[in-house]
Image (spheres, rainbow, N blue to C red):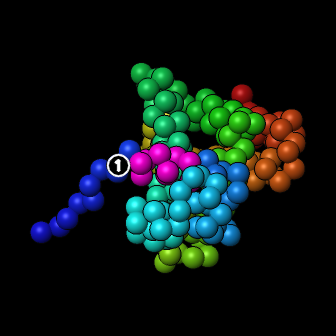
Amino acid sequence: MPTTKPAPSAREQELLERAYAYSLTHGLADLSLRPLATAIGSSPRVLLFLFGSKDGLIRALLARARVDELELLRQLDARYDEPPGLTVVARELWTWLAAPERRPLMKFWVEAYGRSLVAPEGPWADYGRSTVDDWLELLKASQPDPGSAEAEARRTAVLAMLRGALLDLLATGDLKRTTKAVEDYLGD
């Protein structure tokens, strides 16, 4: 009989939120439990007890980051009664992705996405793939005829363009230039 993990305790949830805030500013690449625990008012032993291992904590942090991304997708989905079109949704996505207050989350995403490519068996497993699937699903829902091969290719191209522009923005900080590139690509 399969066992399910009980709902997280209030303390586990609190520490996860603190660890998430910490990881948004410090990243995950060199995550060490001792400095993290000190920064969030805990101990390495408590973190290991609550999350099982460092990998368990990383998986929990990746899941927490995905919650923020999926919330955007839900918000966009709820705003329209009918598919608004790929261009409208792509512009809204760019505005959300490029907002200065989201830079820490976007840097976190880039780091986690990259790690999922080079360490596909570890705690990063499937992170990259799942985010691609999430975003493609949102873009698919915005298209009036999403089932065609042409529609699939178009949403894949839009996603690639948004992610490329995001990488460029994060590397250079040049919002004006990257936004112009997005607008030029999307056209009228």
Secondary structure type for disc 1? loop
Residue in the foreground of this view, choosing between 9 and 119? 9
Q: Determine the image quadrant of residue 28.
A: bottom right
Quarter of the rendering occupied by the N terminus: bottom left
Total tally of numbered discs in the picture: 1
Considering only vertical position in the picture, is 83 above or below 104? Answer: above
Q: Determine the image quadrant of residue 35.
A: bottom right
Residue in the foreground of this view, choosing between 11 and 144? 11
The reply to whether residue 37 is in sight is yes
List x then y, in percent, for residue 79: 48, 23
Q: Is residue 1 magenta?
A: no
Main SS, magenta residues: helix
Badge 1 crowding class, 10 Å Cα cut-off, few under 14, some 14 to 19, many 20 or more, is: few
Considering only vertical position in the picture, is 177 above or below 46? Answer: above
Q: Is residue 17 magenta?
A: yes
Residue lying at 62% horizontally and 58% vertically, measured from the top left: 38
List x then y, in percent, for residue 180: 83, 36
**Which region of the structure is painted magenta?**
11-20
Residue lying at 50% horizontally and 75% vertically, measured from the top left: 122
Residue lying at 26% horizontally and 55% vertically, measured from the top left: 6
The reply to whether residue 184 is in sight is no
The residue that mark 1 highlights is 9
Residue in the foreground of this view, choosing between 129 and 153? 129
Q: Amino acid at mark 1?
A: Ser
| Residue ranking furthest to the left | 1
